[in-house]
Image: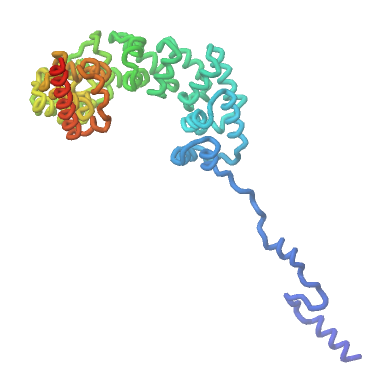
C-alpha cells in the first residue's frame, strides 16, 4: 500500500511529457493530419495573354503588348460582356474585334452600360448608323471611351466633308479625335487659312499622313514649319504651298541642308534644288542612297542632264529597280528594233502608268507577258528584253515576206 502510494506520488511530480501516453490518448486521425498540413487551394488565376489570343483574336506579339495595360484584370466577366456588346454592334470576329482591342486594350475594362452604350447613343444622335460606328470604333482607339467623342466628331465632319474622309484621316492620324479643339485644332485651321490653305482642299487633294498631322501639331510647331517653307522660296498662297508644307514640317533644317548638299555633290545647282523641292517635295524624304543611285543612273545610262531632272523631279521618286531601269531597257530594245510606234521622251515613258505604258507599245499583248519576277532583276530583264526584241523582229520580217 505504501509502495503504491509512493508510485502515484512520483508520477504526479514528473514534468508533463510532450508525447501522448500510449493507451490513454488515441492516435491522431490521418484525415485530421491532412487537413492540418494542407494549405487552402486557390482558384487558377485569369490568364490575360491567353484570353487576348484565344478569345479576342490578337497575335502573341499584340497580346504581350496589350496585357501590360490589363495588369489589374482578374476575371473574364467584364471582357466577355464587352465582346458581346461589340459583336452585337457589328464588329466581326476575329478581325474587327482584334483590331478594336489591339488599338485600345482598356476597352475590355469599360462599363458596357455607362460608357460604351452611351457612346453609341451619342454617335447615333449625330446620324451615324451602327455599321458606321462599328467601322469607327477600331480607328478611334481610346478616344471612343471619351465623353467628348461626339463633340469632336461633330467638329471634324465639316472639315473633312464626309464620314468616309474622317475614317481615311483617322487611319493616318489617330490623334484627330484626341486633340484639344480650342488650343490646337481651331488655331491650326485658322493659321492654315491665313496661309491660303483650305482644310477641305487639303483633304481632297493630299490626304496623307503628313497633311493630316498638320491639324493636330503644336501651333508653334506649325508656325515654325511655315517659316521654313518660306525660306525655301515657296510663298504662301502658291498652289504647291500645302504640299511642300506637309513634307517640310516634319523634316529638320539639318535634314533639308543635308539633301541640298547631296544634290550639290551630284551636280545640281541651288536653283535646281529649289525647283525640286517646289515640284516634288517628297524627294526630301528619300534616303541619300536611293537619290544617288537614281541620279547616277539617269545621267550615266539614260543620258539626262541635271537641269532636265530638276525640271522633272518625280523621276527621282520612281523606283529604280521596278520602273526606271526596266522601262529604259525595254525602250532601248524596242527603239533599236524599230518596234515602238510612238516617239516619246524617256520621262513620258517613265511617268506612264503600267496600263498606259502597255497600251502605247506596238506589241502590247506580248509585253503583258513579262514575268513580274523578271522586272525586279536587272540582268534577267535585259536578257528577256533582248530575246523579246529578236522574236518581234523575226515575226515582222516573216509578215513582210508573206505579204
Q: In screen coordinates, is 177 left or right of 78?
A: left
Q: Nearer the viewer, residue 192 or 170?
A: 170
Dividing the picture into quarters, in which one does residue 235 lie?
top left
Q: How many numbered discs, if any?
A: 0
**Residue 119 percent coordinates (x, y):** 56, 20
Q: In screen coordinates, is 140 left or right of 358?
A: right
> Which residue: 89% across, 91% down?
2
The quadrant of the picture occupied by the C terminus is: top left
The quadrant of the picture occupied by the N terminus is: bottom right
Q: Is residue 274 visible?
A: no
In the image, residue 401 above or below residue 371:
above
**Residue 117 percent coordinates (x, y):** 59, 22
Q: Nearer the viewer, residue 286 or 302?
A: 302
In the image, residue 65 above or below residue 115:
below
Q: In screen coordinates, is 335 left or right of 156?
A: left
**Residue 372 percent coordinates (x, y):** 27, 30
> Which residue: 47% across, 24% down?
140
Q: Is residue 321 visible?
A: yes
**Residue 274 percent coordinates (x, y):** 15, 18
Q: Nearer the viewer, residue 300 or 271?
A: 300
Q: Nearer the viewer, residue 131 or 386?
A: 386
Amino acid at each position: 500500500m505504501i509502495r503504491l502510494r509512493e508510485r502515484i506520488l512520483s508520477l504526479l511530480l514528473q514534468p508533463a511529457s510532450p508525447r501522448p501516453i500510449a493507451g490513454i490518448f488515441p492516435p491522431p486521425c490521418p484525415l485530421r493530419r491532412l487537413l492540418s498540413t494542407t494549405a487552402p487551394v486557390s482558384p487558377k488565376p485569369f490568364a490575360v495573354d491567353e484570353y487576348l489570343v484565344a478569345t479576342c483574336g490578337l497575335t502573341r506579339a499584340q497580346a504581350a503588348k496589350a496585357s501590360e495595360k490589363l495588369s489589374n484584370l482578374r476575371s473574364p466577366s467584364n471582357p466577355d460582356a464587352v465582346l458581346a456588346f461589340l459583336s452585337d454592334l457589328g464588329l466581326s470576329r476575329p478581325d474587327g474585334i482584334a483590331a478594336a482591342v489591339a488599338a485600345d486594350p482598356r476597352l475590355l475594362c469599360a462599363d458596357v452600360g455607362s460608357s460604351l452604350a452611351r457612346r453609341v447613343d451619342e454617335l447615333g444622335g449625330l446620324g451615324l448608323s451602327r455599321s458606321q460606328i462599328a467601322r469607327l470604333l477600331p480607328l478611334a482607339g481610346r478616344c471612343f471611351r471619351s465623353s467628348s467623342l461626339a463633340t469632336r466628331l461633330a467638329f471634324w465632319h465639316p472639315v473633312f466633308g464626309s464620314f468616309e474622309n474622317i475614317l481615311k484621316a483617322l487611319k493616318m492620324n489617330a490623334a484627330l479625335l484626341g486633340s484639344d479643339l480650342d488650343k490646337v485644332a481651331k488655331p491650326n485651321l485658322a493659321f492654315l487659312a491665313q496661309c491660303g490653305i483650305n482644310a477641305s482642299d487639303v483633304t481632297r487633294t493630299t490626304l496623307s499622313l503628313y497633311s493630316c498631322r498638320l491639324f493636330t501639331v503644336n501651333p508653334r510647331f506649325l508656325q515654325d514649319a511655315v517659316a521654313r517653307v518660306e525660306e525655301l522660296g515657296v510663298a504662301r498662297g502658291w498652289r504647291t504651298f500645302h504640299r511642300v508644307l506637309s513634307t517640310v514640317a516634319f523634316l529638320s533644317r539639318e535634314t533639308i541642308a543635308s539633301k541640298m548638299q547631296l544634290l550639290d555633290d551630284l551636280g545640281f545647282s541651288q536653283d535646281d534644288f529649289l525647283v525640286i523641292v517646289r515640284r516634288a517635295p517628297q524627294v526630301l524624304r528619300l534616303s541619300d542612297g536611293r537619290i544617288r543611285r537614281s541620279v547616277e543612273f539617269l545621267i550615266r545610262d539614260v543620258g539626262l542632264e541635271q537641269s532636265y531632272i530638276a525640271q522633272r523631279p518625280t523621276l527621282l521618286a520612281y523606283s529604280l529597280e521596278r520602273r526606271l531601269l526596266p522601262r529604259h531597257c525595254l525602250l532601248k530594245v524596242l527603239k533599236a528594233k524599230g518596234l515602238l510606234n510612238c516617239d516619246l521622251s524617256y520621262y513620258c515613258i517613265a511617268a506612264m502608268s503600267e496600263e498606259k505604258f502597255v497600251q502605247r507599245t506596238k506589241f502590247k499583248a506580248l509585253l503583258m507577258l513579262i514575268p513580274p519576277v523578271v522586272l525586279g532583276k536587272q540582268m534577267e530583264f535585259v536578257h528577256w528584253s533582248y530575246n523579246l526584241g529578236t522574236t518581234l523582229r523575226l515575226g515582222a520580217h516573216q509578215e513582210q515576206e508573206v505579204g
